[in-house]
Image (cartoon, rainbow, N blue to C red):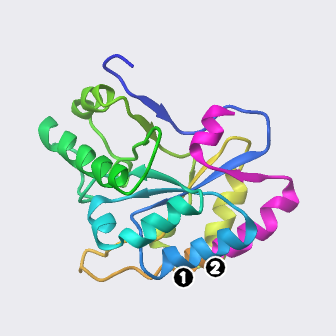
Amino acid sequence: MGVFPKFIFRVRIKENLVALTFDDGPHPEFTKELLDLFKERGIKATFFVTGEKIEKHREIIKRMIADGHELGNHSYSHKNLIFKKKSKIKEEIQKTDYLLRDLGVKGEIHFRPPYGRLLFSAFAVLASLNKKVIMWNIPTKDYKERDPKVILSRIYKRIKPGSIIVLHDSGIERTGKEIDRQATIDAVKELINELPKKVYKFRTVSELIDY
């Protein structure tokens, strides 16, 4: 990959395939509800999880793997990596990779930076670790939205073949309080019912890349 990692915002394909991705989890309530929904419908998603949450919810990670979902690296602590030393960035990524491998994740583990933010100093680290950086072309802004209809409207407005949709199944407010993700859950419920009617199918990020 050289000194620059590959950034992917959307996969250029003609087929009506899209990827549902979730950041900041897993969460003992909201993630499980999503997993139940996806299992019922036979849908596979990509979850970018943090190392700290992996350590707290190992059984949920094991279920994700067993259900066939893709696990990505969202750093260990979910702290902003901007202005962090290269050694710290590398530690955040490798520590989470190790936890995922220890729980049985095989194949390539993609990376998504906390808050979607990186500076040039992180590029060489990511390239040395052979990481693809998975961003998105559909920012739902569900992290601050309480109306599922607004979340859905943002998706429907920008949906196209190869789209990567970013949502959140967990998260912490600045006050330290956990964020209620019920609006996201409700939006996903409608999305998986309505989007297939528009002839779209769901795939993991890696499945889009390899298509």
Observer-nearest of 195 and 58: 58
Residue at image x 40%, y 47%? Answer: 112
- Residue 155 shows in this picture: yes
- Expressed as whole percent of the image width and height from the top left, the position of residue 39 reads 67, 70
Residue 186 disc label: 2
Q: Which amino acid does the dot numbered 2 rest on? A: Asp
Q: Is residue 121 magenta?
A: no
Residue at image x 58%, y 73%? Answer: 34
Q: Dots 2 and 1: beta carbons under 8 Å? A: yes
Q: Please name the residue that numbered disc 1 is placed on.
A: 182
Residue at image x 25%, y 44%? Answer: 94
Residue at image x 78%, y 61%? Answer: 195
- Expressed as whole percent of the image width and height from the top left, the position of residue 89 reads 20, 42
Direction from residue 28 to residue 18 in the image, left or right:
right
Residue 30 disc label: none
Asked which secondary structure carries label 2, the reply is helix
Decide: is 157 above or below 187.
above
Q: Quadrant of the N terminus?
A: top left
- Residue 141 shows in this picture: no
Q: Which amino acid does the dot numbered 1 rest on? A: Gln
Q: State the residue lying farthest toward the top.
A: 2
